[in-house]
Amino acid sequence: MRILLFSGKGGVGKTSLAAATGLQLSRLGYRTLVMSVDPAHSLADAFDLETELFHGKTGDPYPIDERLAIHEVNIQKEIKRHWREISSYVISVLRTTGINDVEAEELAILPGMEELSAMMYVNQFRREGRYDIIVLDCAPTAESMRFVSMPTTLEWYMKHIFPFQRGILKAVRPLANRVSPVELPTDSYFANIQDLFGKLDGIGELLEDPRVTSVRLVTNPERMVLRETQRAFVYFSLHGLTVDGVIVNRLLPGSVTDAYFQEWRASQAKIMDEIEAYFAPVAVKRVPLFTHEVLGRERLDELSRSLYGEQEDPAAVTRTEAPYSFNKVDGHYEVKLLLPFAVKGEVGLFKKGDELVVEVGTLRRHIGLPTSMAGLTPSRAKLDNRVLTVELREV
Ligand SMILES: Nc1ncnc2c1ncn2[C@@H]1O[C@H](COP(=O)(O)OP(=O)(O)OP(=O)(O)O)[C@@H](O)[C@H]1O
Ligand SMILES: [Mg+2]
């Protein structure tokens, strides 16, 4: 199975491109699912499905044609399916603060639930072998990052915090429930978390395998958008995901010669040069600004042809080099991490237990070290030619 993840700044064209990619893939014979992970879903709108008729139905995979389905993960439905125990605990806590029921229910949607639900589906569909390809239409960059960092964060929580919390609560619950205004979570709350965690088993490896998961960054030929695209590239690499394509959307076509757009044309051309140079060897695709919105099947087909022609296979694996690797060189060990666009001052590094912790700006990644390297200490680090190399030695 392949997972193609479309990410980028708000409004750049992620949903349109994910939908057009789904169409191309199904045309080539793949059983394809386009799944929206953005709580502000617009996937059904891109296909111009009549809202009245389709309302609520896209919360499960909804067939567009023989081989193509769309799925807008519906958080209310997911709470009923998976999160009841957790959210009812949060609701009961919120109620004790005087918040009314409806407000409490709204507030009990914790950040990350949508992303986790989407991941559970990806894992479930993979186990069932239901689709050849899942195209993920992500929310704007920040939320996408939450999506991809979820498996490692959760794993960390389950390893370091969960057993401790559960143990402590078991011991203090009888007493605490008598004196505290807030009821402590029951054991079934923890069982629920454990069960949910089990449903995500293996998803981390799937996301980090470049033969399975590829990130396609969508951008526009504008400086501010480009900056965010570069940040996204760093963050995805930090989380071990492989970016194998950049799509520049809304380029002014050559046929527009109006003097009004002259400055736009010049700046777009300049930024295109920068993009090609920055992202090489990652392939850069261009999509023109159309004369109309990309709405409905026909327009999506037009976009898909502009992107891929008749033949090109969007699922082809073009980059297999993982963003990080562990190596033994001249008697010492090394971790290499591909970090294009990162600058020296913003990279932090330390070791905690058997993990190497790398920080870039405000993002942090715990990298579990292989057993042979777990007892070593970082002795040197250098950021050179887009690669962070950390040397580990015995002390
Ligand atoms: N190349 C294009 N030419 C003309 N219109 C476009 C093009 N690409 C996208 N659009 C239009 O721009 C709008 C935003 O596109 P889209 O919804 O795909 O962006 P998005 O990145 O998914 O946005 P969001 O961050 O809100 O999810 C839509 O109305 C879409 O039809
Ligand atoms: Mg969108």
Image (cartoon, rainbow, N blue to C red):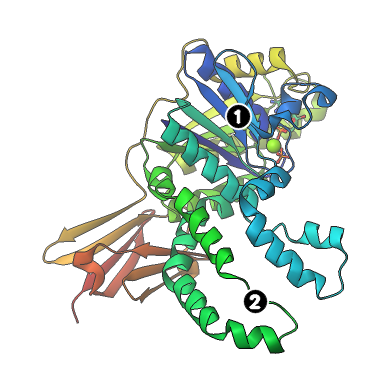
Labels 2 and 1: the sequence-earlier one: 1
CA–CA distance between discs 2 and 1? 43 Å
Q: In this view, does 19 lie above or below 312?
A: below
> In this view of the protein, which residue sits in the foreground, 18 or 111?
111
Looking at the rendered structure, the kind of residue marked 1 is Ala
The quarter of the image holding the C terminus is bottom left
Along the horizontal axis of the image, is 348 left or right of 393? right
Along the horizontal axis of the image, is 369 left or right of 36? left
Q: In this view, does 228 lie above or below 367?
A: above
**Is the residue marked 1 within 8 Å of ligand 1, measured from its CB?**
yes
Image point 39% across, 53% down: which residue? 386
Q: Determine whether the residue tagged by mark 2 lies in a helix, strand or loop.
A: loop
Residue 78 horizontal/vertical position (percent): 66, 45
The quadrant where residue 45 appears: top right
* Contact, mark 2 vs mark 1 (Cβ under 8 Å): no
Residue 27 horizontal/vertical position (percent): 53, 12
Q: What residue would you read off at disc 1?
A: 18
**Is the residue marked 2 within 8 Å of ligand 1, measured from its CB?**
no
Looking at the rendered structure, the kind of residue marked 2 is Leu
Image point 50% across, 55% down: which residue? 195
Image point 60% across, 23% down: which residue? 69
Along the horizontal axis of the image, is 271 left or right of 152? right
Query: Which residue is the extreme one toward the top?
Result: 310
Image point 64% across, 86% down: which residue? 176
Q: Can residue 215 be seen in this view?
A: no
Q: In this view, does 163 lie above or below 256?
A: below
Q: What residue would you read off at disc 2?
A: 184
Along the horizontal axis of the image, is 329 left or right of 184? left
Q: Determine whether the residue tagged by mark 1 lies in a helix, strand or loop.
A: helix
